[in-house]
Amino acid sequence: MRKIVIAGNWKMFKTQAESAEFLSGFLPHLEETPSEREVVICPPFTDLSLVSQSLHGSRVNLGAQNVHWEESGAYTGEIAASMLIEIGVRFVIVGHSERRQFFGETDVSVNLRLKAAQKHGLTPILCVGETKQQRDAGETESIISTQLKKDLVDIDQTHLIIAYEPIWAIGTGDTCESKEANRVIGLIRSQLTNPLVPIQYGGSVNPNNIDEIMAQPEIDGALVGGASLKADSFARIVNYQ
Ligand SMILES: O=C(CO)COP(=O)(O)O
């Protein structure tokens, strides 16, 4: 049985005060959430410590939005895996398209980050996906296949989550049709050596489309941006039908 993992990526949103307000509205809704669903929140680095304390004793797991591959050193603006582990982080997003697009992440650096995460016991959520231009040119399969081949060199597939995030569907309200997301996720799975790796869909997931997305047989969860910022809306997503 593959695990279901619903994760909220808060990106560069929420101060500590806003995080605390979110949690007081969100956590009570988890009483309705089936116990086998894994729920993860990935706040900005400055919120991690506070959110970690607030989540103590709850069933929600803490995730970070990036991790560096070195143990420590002169890497201004980066964060080491041991620093994340120390405050209770268990998951980390790696290779998000916003990191690749705006901050120069390459498949080589993504691979190094995945390795560092796993070495320290963090479960990485590896993001892959194509641009609109690549999709229109019929390159979706080849782009994703290349990303997977390069990103997953020497990566342990027993402690790994993959998120299929078509870049054109992120923050646009333009969700990938659920059957198409299911098809691409099936292709991703066919490239993996471990058939049990959970594969999420991400890109304009919201309370109105989550039921249909999760009804697809290949889709094992969601990586949610904008709709994970409001307690009611993220609660509806984790409690999908
Ligand atoms: O990038 C995403 C999650 O990592 C998706 O963002 P949105 O849900 O806002 O489209």
Image: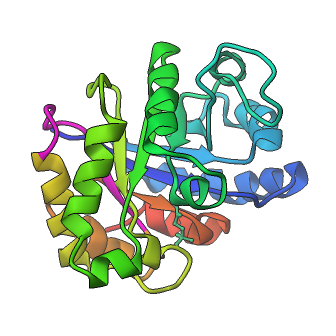
Specify start and end residues of the magenta stretch as a single range.
191-202
Q: Position of residue 62 (x, y in %)?
A: 60, 36
Q: Where is residue 96 in the image (x, y as percent from the top left)?
A: 52, 53
Q: Main secondary structure of the magenta part?
A: loop
Q: Which of 24/99 is in front? A: 99
Q: Is residue 6 magenta?
A: no
Q: Which residue is drawn at 54% across and 37% down?
A: 92
Residue reaching furthest left? 190
The quadrant the C terminus occupies is: bottom left
Q: Position of residue 224 (x, y in %)?
A: 51, 63
Q: Is residue 205 visible?
A: no
Q: In the rendered image of this protein, does residue 91 appear above or below residue 235? A: above
Q: Which of 84/156 is in front? A: 156
The quadrant the N terminus occupies is: top left
Q: Classify residue 77 as left or right of residue 33.
A: right
Q: Residue at x 47, y 14 (%)?
A: 119
Q: In the rendered image of this protein, does residue 213 appear above or below residue 1? A: below
Q: Does the magenta stretch include residue 193?
A: yes
